[in-house]
Amino acid sequence: MATKSKIEWTESTWNPVTGCTKVSPGCKHCYAERMAARLQAMGQRNYVNGFKLTLHDHMLEKPLSWKKPQRIFVNSMSDLFHEEVPMAFIEKVFDVMRRAFWHQFQILTKRSERLFELSSQIEWPDNVWMGVSVENQDYTFRIDHLRQTDARIKFLSLEPLLGPLVDLNLSGIDWAIVGGESGLGARPMREEWVLQIRSQCQAAGVPFFFKQWGGINKKRAGRTLEGKTWDDFPVKAANHPLSSHQPEVRPAQFTLLKAIEGH
């Protein structure tokens, strides 16, 4: 059974790698770091090392047993392009995604330099969406790195959005997600930043997905922008089996453990 996710833009998570290290301001209040500590305390075997980067060979072929086509967020608890993840392991992950062709896999990285360096060594399957995280203007260079990869679908996660993003070059970008930071210590996101990004996406013809306002109580803050929810997905994904399959609303009774690893 797939590991269900409450993340609005995906359906399931798959974590053949767990743990990470901070590389930029968006990492300050890392959700995955807090979650890993809780899972370690619960005795979950994949988190015996806490948030120290760990490879999990036993997790590699999980998606092959999930028969229902779905969107799968790869390494929600890590970064596949972390410098401590060997290229050989990255190739294994891509091999599984290639073989599990009925799914769509969504990968996010903040390590765009390594993504760019390794891209030519990767055989990119059509069912892999590659994204980079950009939290403020200082990190828009990640978009340039992403643009130069051979990923079929390229997307941006502008979350946690910590400042305005002006004059974005959205050439070659297929999708943009925007969201505010959530949890204790969450830094505020201004509406004008979001509207500016939405306008740039509309002008460039890039599908726009508004994930959340964030804050300490993200459920109360909601995810509507000017009275509307924005749930656009990449146009290039339209010929995939999931094209008419929209993300489901996940019941609140899913346990913390199931929400992350499912076992």
Image (cartoon, helix red, strand yellow):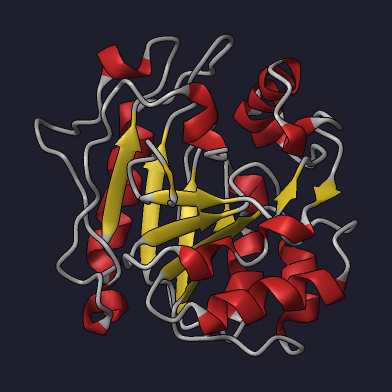
Compared to residue 78, the image places residue 27 above or below, namely above
Judge left or right: residue 238 versus residue 122.
Answer: left
> Where does the image place residue 52, in percent across and percent down from the top left?
86, 36
Residue at 19 percent across and 33 percent down: it is: 225
Q: What residue is shown at x 56% (from left), y 9% (from top)?
A: 184
Q: Is residue 151 left or right of residue 21?
A: left
Q: Does 11 appear above or below 42?
A: below
| Figure quadrant of residue 46 | top right
Name the residue nearer the viewer: 145 or 252: 252
Whole-percent x, y for residue 205 in the image: 25, 70
Residue 15 visible? The answer is: yes
Q: How many marks?
A: 0
Viewer-closest of 46 and 241: 46
Q: Is residue 160 visible?
A: no
User: Looking at the image, which residue is at 50% across and 49% down?
Assistant: 13
Name, please, the residue furthest toward the left: 227
Frontmost residue, 233 versus 39: 39
Q: What residue sits 45% from the left and 10% below the top? A: 216
Residue 193: give x, y in percent of width and height: 38, 36
For the C terminus, the image quarter is top right
Residue 145 x %, y % = 66, 72
Q: Is residue 221 left or right of residue 162?
A: left
- Classify residue 117 as left or right of residue 98: right
